[in-house]
Image: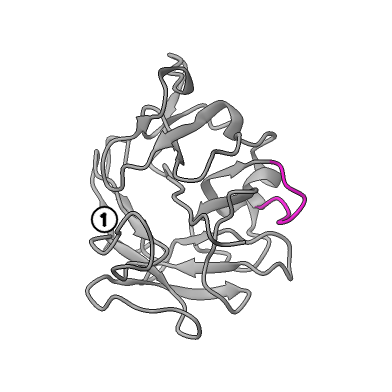
């Protein structure tokens, strides 16, 4: 949360869903949309793991704050609370190095493609034909961030600051630093223009190189 007030995630959704029928999913935080139970205080970060089971993914994310969990094809860490599968395809979430996207929305709409009026924040990377662009691209974002090599991730630098216009303008290659400040792989990968604006909906995409 890069803002100055408390933000709440009750009922909010995270998705890599593209157009209807794509093999991608929508997951929801517990609680009622607009509720005040899941707070993110100013300056606080939230770590969400695709898999929080020890040995399932590198780096180890077994101490994550939340875990995407799909009971049909996923292992569960009982010590980490789950995001609930609520839409899209009947599968776990999976993000691809070759091109993908991720967005956060209020949860008013949980069907692909997510209603533009409900989208809070997002990122698209590496312009691939498959999967199709997600709602963040269609609603707000005209460009893709560059793809990054295996073992790296994408992040805003400094975290939580963005133009809110373009993934290519705002997202840079990072050394993976789960639940810690963003660390650029190289100084040239990090731009900090003074016109950037704060957004509480900063999303950091750590993705599995072995999927898709």
Instruction: Give percent across and percent down for residue 167.
Output: 58, 34
Left or right of residue 16, residue 160 in this image:
left
Residue 166 seen in render: no
Viewer-proximal residue among 16 and 63:
63
Q: Can you give x and y, in whole percent of width and height, for residue 177 in the image? A: 31, 42
Q: In this rendering, would 128 be left or right of 63?
A: right
Name the foreground residue: 155 vs 41.
155
Find out whether residue 130 is within the magenta segment. yes
Q: Secondary structure at mark 1?
A: strand
Q: Report which quarter residue 25 is drawn in.
A: bottom right
Horizontally, residue 123 falls left or right of residue 44, namely right
Q: Is residue 150 in the magenta section?
A: no
According to the picture, the residue beneath numbered tag 1 turns out to be 39
Q: Quadrant of residue 83?
A: bottom left
Residue at x 45%, y 84% (from the top left corner): 71
Please tell me which residue is depicted at 27% across the width and 40% down the height of the picture. 5
Question: In what quadrant of the picture does the C terminus appear?
Answer: bottom right
For the stretch drawn in magenta, the main secondary structure is loop
Q: Position of residue 206 (x, y in %)?
A: 44, 50
Give the residues drawn in magenta, as a range. 127-134
Measured along the vertical axis of the image, is residue 112 above or below residue 177?
A: below
The N terminus lies in which quarter of the figure?
Answer: top left
């Amino acid at each position: 949360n890069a803002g100055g007030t408390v933000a709440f995630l009750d009922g909010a959704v995270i998705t890599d869903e593209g157009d209807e029928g794509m093999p991608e999913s929508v997951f929801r935080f517990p609680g009622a949309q607009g509720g005040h139970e899941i707070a993110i205080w100013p300056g606080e970060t939230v770590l969400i793991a695709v898999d929080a089971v020890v040995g399932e993914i590198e780096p180890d994310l077994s101490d994550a704050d939340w875990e995407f969990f799909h009971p049909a094809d996923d292992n569960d860490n009982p010590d980490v609370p789950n995001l609930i599968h609520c839409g899209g395809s009947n599968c776990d979430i999976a993000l691809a190095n070759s091109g993908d996207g991720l967005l956060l929305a209020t949860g008013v709409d949980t069907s692909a493609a997510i209603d533009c009026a409900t989208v809070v924040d997002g990122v698209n990377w590496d312009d691939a034909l498959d999967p199709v662009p997600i709602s963040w691209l269609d609603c707000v974002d005209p460009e893709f961030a560059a793809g990054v090599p295996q073992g790296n991730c994408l992040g805003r630098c400094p975290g939580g600051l963005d133009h809110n216009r373009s993934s290519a303008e705002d997202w840079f290659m990072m050394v993976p630093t789960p639940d810690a400040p963003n660390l650029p792989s190289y100084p040239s990968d990090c731009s900090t223009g003074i016109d950037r604006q704060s957004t509480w909906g900063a999303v950091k995409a750590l993705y599995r190189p072995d999927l898709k």
